[in-house]
Image (cartoon, grey):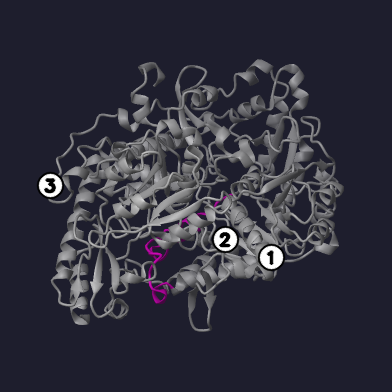
Amino acid sequence: MLRALGLKSVDDLFADVPASVRAALDLAPGMSELEAVTRITEILAANRSMDDMPMFLGGGVYDHFVPASVRAITSRSEFYTSYTPYQPELSQGILQTLWEYQSLICELTGMDAANTSLYDASTALGEAALMSRRIHGGDVFLIPRAIRWNRRSVLQNYLLGGGLRVRDVDYDRGTGMLDLAKLKEALTPDVCGVYVESPNFFGRLEENVEEVRAMAQEAVLVVGINPIAQAVLKPPGDFGADIVIGEGQALGNPPNFGGPLLGVFACRQEHVRKMPGRVIGLTRDVKGHRAFCMTLQTREQHIRREKAMSNICTNESLLAVAAAAYMAVLGSNGLRSVAADNIRRARDLAAAIDRIDGYVAPLFKGAHFNEFTVRAKKGYERVRKGLLEHGVHGGIALKRYLPELEDVALFTTTERHRPEHYQRLLTALEDLA
Amino acid sequence: MFRQAYYDEPLLFEKRSQDDIDVDLTDLVPAKLRRGRLGIPNLPEHDVVRHYTRLSQMNFGIDSGFYPLGSCTMKFNPKYAEELAALPTVARLHPDQDESTVQGALRLLHELQGALGTISGMDAVTLQPAAGAQGELTGLLLAAAYHRDRGETRTQVILPDTAHGTNFASAGMLGFEIVEIPSKDGRVDLRALENAVGPKSLAFMLTNPNTLGIFEERVLEIADVVHDAGALLYYDGANLNAILGKTSPGAMRFDIVHFNLHKTFTTPHGGGGPGAGPVGVRRPLEPYLPYPFVAYEGRRYHFDYDRPKSIGKVRAWYGNFALLVRAYAYILRQGADGLTASAERAVLNANYTMARLKGVLDVPFGGLRKHEFVASGASLVPKGVRTVDVAKRLMDFGVHPPTVYFPHLVEEALMVEPTETETRETLDAFADVLARIVKEDPQTLRDAPHHTAVARVDEVRAARDAILSWRTAKGRKPESL
């Protein structure tokens, strides 16, 4: 091949790279596949996964059971080794799959349109705030004070350029829901959007979304969801939401140490041209057959450049494929039964913990999804460490987010927990009380 | 000749659903929040698997055939990486686990930070950004924080006209002013750059080799111009595959680098994602990196949050971990020799393919290319054929079309990146097909593709009436379905 180019050596191919910038790689030499796989497997063996110990962690990432069919579907290499479907004629498979994903998300949320994914819920929140301003024009975005801190930090970085400010709305100390009186105070005319989560950071179902809508009539209403909970909850569209976002990982994707995740993003039809991210549309081919293609691309970076709705290009499409496959395998019946089962488990577990002297659970009374707050009267850090020694991973400590919740943790359960996991947790909690 | 499968596969929603089973929610969900029914069909599992198997057969991946999509580095995705990423010690880790239970994950992240630092010649690396574009956003946030800390307000980002669209969008998203400079002979015009830089310049973003596949030989002079103005030099890592083991962004005096692990380090692209877009920086920028940073104390690895100057977070948690595992496995497997050889072969394949196309399509700007080249279909326009027609016709031969109509400075552009994992036979076959296509009857090309699942798709119709969901579709007249 070099000869065909009239070159003598490989070095001639790099004649345009000046000596002044030359640099060789200071890495170890390569190894066989067997060696590389062994090495990585050995490094990872120092981890303790949920296979090794029961964990009661959630807070945005959840360990739900994923039927084997879901991975079989995402392992089709026609899907996972393909690029973004810029050429629709060759890519109908993933285009229809992603259009169906959009449709399934719309069924869950009551929205008319969804994109094919953003990176995760935190960047979806950042994008939702920017979109709220595009729709409304105001420069203040309201968020609950009780929010996962990584969502807050990401939001602030996304808003840096636009001069959009974030204002907190506190929670009601009794119910754990948004404090409506505080919301009223915060709702000045320059508020472009209001963000509410249900279930919220405490796992508590937010019962006042309708009231929030009524109070914030001018602003864009952004609702954060848990997609599994949504199977039994009224869609935010029914409460007048403009934009719905959420962490979609729970739908058929493993926790993966927090990445990749699936940013769910949906909106009402009137807003689609202001929506960020890639979307798939329904159309026809020249022969009149049904076909799908990427559409509304004039919103996107490769066409619109600095005027684009977002800079996102590569997204989390394969996780959207998994989410669609998961919803298709479970169907309405399966999804609703998982959701109801999770609610029941969390309720029963909270009650069992609450019965142990030295703990209050849940701290906030009322309806929860699959996580809830636990107060350890003698301090949570000691309990958390003690649980680890008992081979159980306790919930997330909340004092880092909300100083007034110093002894409080967020415990999560899903259908993957077995009776002996609960027993081990309860016994350990009793020991540590 | 290639023939793609075609099934008249109905939507999930059009399949016959089994009956809903009533779930009693009375004690579980307050009445005002309770959902009546959920409009997702109940289908037998076998039918669902068959549905997606059929759809996958109407899709084209790297495993299906040649995929010379310029700037995207569509090379073989090794299967061992898939197996590793599926291990429970990767998949079933929660990001909030106590550090003592995830020492393996932290060690892997730490080692990968080091390997990427070595490869790029940078002093510190964050693995947090989820994709290349998010890496750009992160890099610009770092540049802004760096200048701000020095009491300087710099608001202009300078970009060559060959830059990726995401460069513009990332700068625009952060509210920066964009100064675009024209190229000269397919390279940065130093004079134009000198005129563009000044006290308001935040950074100059450059891809090297650039999107024409041309190596910017005067990169050190570029670096001087940028640094003399007090601005930072940003390396868009989309084309890093071309220079592994030959030079590095550090050796070229870049200050900030983003990597596309789904390109250079061959994590699969998943039909659009996930990717991973780590960012490397020089020492003076390290304090601003997103937290947490993975540190090692001689006995244990830990997440370092004690970084007062950090810009905070750009996404939840630590990055696309399952992709980082794949990329690190690939780096170990290849090693210094394997990575260098991959760059050599990628460059050889690109130049060979370009040479094979002599007399078939024009390739503006002479000289060597690195990993890709941009041909022009302009000579076909007089006979009524456009680049899009050539692209569509390539599909009939089982080839995924190259990137088209980018970069904008080449008329009717076809951007070809063969990558190192293609054989000479594949490249010859591609060249032969193109040679045949350009001589074909123009109507055959305009009607192409002929052998894909569907014929040419009406993209205008899709945009005019945006039907983005089944909910919306149901409300339309039956003929729109």
Q: Residue at x 48, y 37 (%)?
A: A135
Tell me the chain of label 1. Answer: B
Give the mark nearer the N terminus: 1 vs 3.
Answer: 3
Name the one closer to the observer, A56 or A9. Answer: A56
Q: Is residue B66 visible?
A: no
Given residues B122 and B338, the one toward you in this image is B122
The residue shown at (38%, 65%) is: B93
Q: Which residues are magenta?
A: B76-102
Does the magenta segment cover residue B92?
yes
Circles 1 and 3 on the same chain: yes
Question: Which image quadrant: the C terminus of chain A?
Answer: bottom left
Residue B110 sits above or below residue A347 on the image:
below
The residue shown at (39%, 34%) is A268
Query: Which residue bears the numbered disc 3?
Result: B26
Instruction: Name the residue carrying label 2.
Output: B330
Q: x and y percent of residue A416 in the render? A: 25, 59
- Chain to which the residue tagged by mark 3 belongs: B
Residue A106, image x, y percentages: 35, 37
**In the rendered image, which quarter is residue A371 located in?**
bottom left
Amino acid of disc 1: Gly
Q: Chain of mark 2?
A: B
What SS does tag 3 mark? loop
Identify the element where label 1 is drawn: loop
- In this picture, residue A423 sits left or right of residue B479: left
**Is residue B158 shown to the viewer in this render?**
yes
Q: Are marks 2 and 3 on the same chain?
A: yes
Q: Residues within 10 Å of mark 1 (few under 14, many from 20)?
A: few
Looking at the rendered image, the disc whose residue lies closer to the viewer, 1 or 2, is 1
Q: Amino acid at mark 2?
A: Tyr
- Circle 2 packing at 10 Å, graded few (<14), some (14-19), many (20+), is many
On residue B151, which mark appears?
Answer: 1
